Image: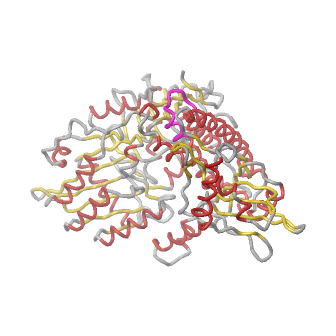
Amino acid sequence: MRINGYYQNRELSWLKFNERVLLLADDANVPLCEKLTFASIFQSNLDEFFMVRVGTLHDQMLFSDNKIDNKTKMTAKEQLTHIFKSARELTRKKDNIYKHLMVKLQEYGVQLLSFNDIEYNDALYLEKYFKESVLPFLSPQVVGKKQPFPFMKNKEIYAVALLGRRNSEKVGIVPCSNGVLSRLVPIPSDEKKFMLVEELILHFMPQIFENYQIKSKSLIRIIRNADIDVDEAVDNDDADFRDTMEKLIKKRRKLCPVKLEYTRVMDEKIVINLCHELGLKQEQIYYSESPLDLSFVFEIQDKLRNNKKLFYERHIAKVPEWVDGGRPMISQIEEKDRLLYYPYESMNPFIRLLNEAGQDRRVVSIKMTLYRVAKNSQIIEALINAAENGKEVVVLVELRARFDEENNIEWSRRLEEAGCRIVYGLDHTKVHSKLCLITYQDGGVVHYITQIGTGNYNEKTAKQYTDLSLMTSNKSIGSEAAETFSKLCMEEYIEDTTTLLVAPKYLKSEIIQYMNDEIKAVEDGKPGYIGIKINSLTDKEIIDKLVECSQAGVKIEMIIRGICCLIPGIPGCTENITIKSAVGRFLEHSRIYIFGTPDRDRIYIASADFMTRNMEHRVEIAAPIYDDSIKQRIREIFDIKENEYIKIWTLGEDGLYHHDN
């Protein structure tokens, strides 16, 4: 949908991205079991979108009458109308793809059955299983004057029924998710055939509500708003920040619903009742022909692991050739700047660097920013070991990393107990940078090893996301990294730098200045060039500057995986801009900024997308690349090509994405 010249709406652009994810579940080049993964990712993505973005717009509609999108001039209500329509269309597309996938699975003996499909003896077994292994764990409720409408948890499945008795009707509700019940119920006659536990519960609703007539029944699932205002809560609370965050997490679980999904034909009386109790409108009600939660597909995959053709070929991250197992990592980095490219290369050399630093007598301190870390983090363990070895370990833990708050709170406690100094960052500004600084003394001289990355210190995502990790002994970079940590510990911003680009004060302005330099190059008769690889482009000031560059004749190539609010290829406006999106096996996550042609280019890797939140409301860092061989490698990474693992789409002047083939 194209609105107002070269802009397109952020939320609708994101839905187009999630559609590209969904289409991988229907791609002939993707193995069958991997298609199931993409279908599940599509659904979880959409859930989070409703929880965060729709939740935010819902609040704006209720409490900010005059707030509009600064690019397309759409009100919150107008955006929601378009979102609900697009999401409904995507749900239908997902249902069709899911049906096709389940038919394909039958070729390998795997089936999800209903009671219409099973043999008599299997039906007897399932009834016995229900009575002995399911019914004792259920907590059914009849909603009436003495039984108020129950609280319904976010993303959990419920069986609902319209109950009749003595000329009256009530609603019966049964939670189907309690952490005890297995989602896939095996069918005894065939180890590859199953029934979903919610379908089993729904079938036996007459036994649950045995004193009622079941007039209608269905399965439902609600999505709740997850948009909590952390800064406002912190400003109004004198308690410890960590304690305040724990309270907010509990509060978020109870925020208002923004979406209800259901299967089967649901009686209108139940719909009306649910809408009334949950405060939803009809446009927020979605019918689904596929299961309401697709996470069970990973259990199905486990049943087919022996059939290798149904999966991607196993990927093993390599240890780069430059890594010498017989020499300390610090000395190898002192010799030359080093780059790791996840997931094609292993994170182990960086983890080894941390472990060695924790043991090195010369090392005085290790400082690190943590945004999202793995559940069983080797990096955390390395920091704990360093602290126990007497090193000063300073860790900035961002407790406001959405949906990772609880994990980060727990890690912050463990680090603190081990003797690490914990910092929580700045008011109203998340610390999203990926920065690690090792300070050591040798011959009375202070030295630095600085690591700056595009992705989190997370061993799990390092195997799933493409990210870059620079390790350098450059004195200027190390000094500015040290200043960054010093300012953060004093709850201050870096106002100016000469080497690193640090948001929120000194990143956006430099990016715009570099764009102006390319305009000047064209005016001087030289070719101007900008190459950008990011996840999202939403910042209006940067978008308008890109348009100005295009109109001046600067060639601009952009790889934007997700949200893109700029439409390229419009004559007289954005005709010198090309925009591609790469989706596939690995999540394209690295951020690369290139300004200028190869003979004079400035190349940075960064933690920041071109979004206003990154540029103005977060601490982000972009690091310059000085080593010529690393520069060349990054140019090669930027020149992304379609292969068996990556599908490339081109954004057209019509605002739609077209597959390059």
Is 637 situated left or right of 556 in this image?
A: left
Image position, residue 568 (x, y; %): 58, 30
Image position, residue 398 (x, y; %): 43, 61
| Residue nearest the observer in this picture, 587 or 333 | 587
Is 131 situated left or right of 530 in this image?
A: right
Residue pictured at 64% horizontal, 65% vertical = 255
| Image position of 78 with respect to 65: above or below | above
| Image position of 518 with respect to 226: above or below | above
Can residue 547 be seen in this snapshot? Answer: no
Determine if the magenta segment contains residue 28.
yes
Determine if the magenta segment contains residue 284.
no
Is 318 situated left or right of 221 in this image?
A: left
Image quarter of residue 15: top right
Q: Residue furthest right?
A: 167
Q: Quadrant of the C terminus?
A: top right
- Span of residues in magenta: 26-38
Image quarter of residue 164: bottom right
Residue pictured at 28% horizontal, 70% vertical = 418
Image position, residue 264 (x, y; %): 74, 48
Image position, residue 533 (x, y; %): 45, 36
Image quarter of residue 71: top right
| Residue nearest the observer in this picture, 627 or 199 | 199
Is 225 situated left or right of 347 in this image?
A: right
Q: Residue furthest left?
A: 443
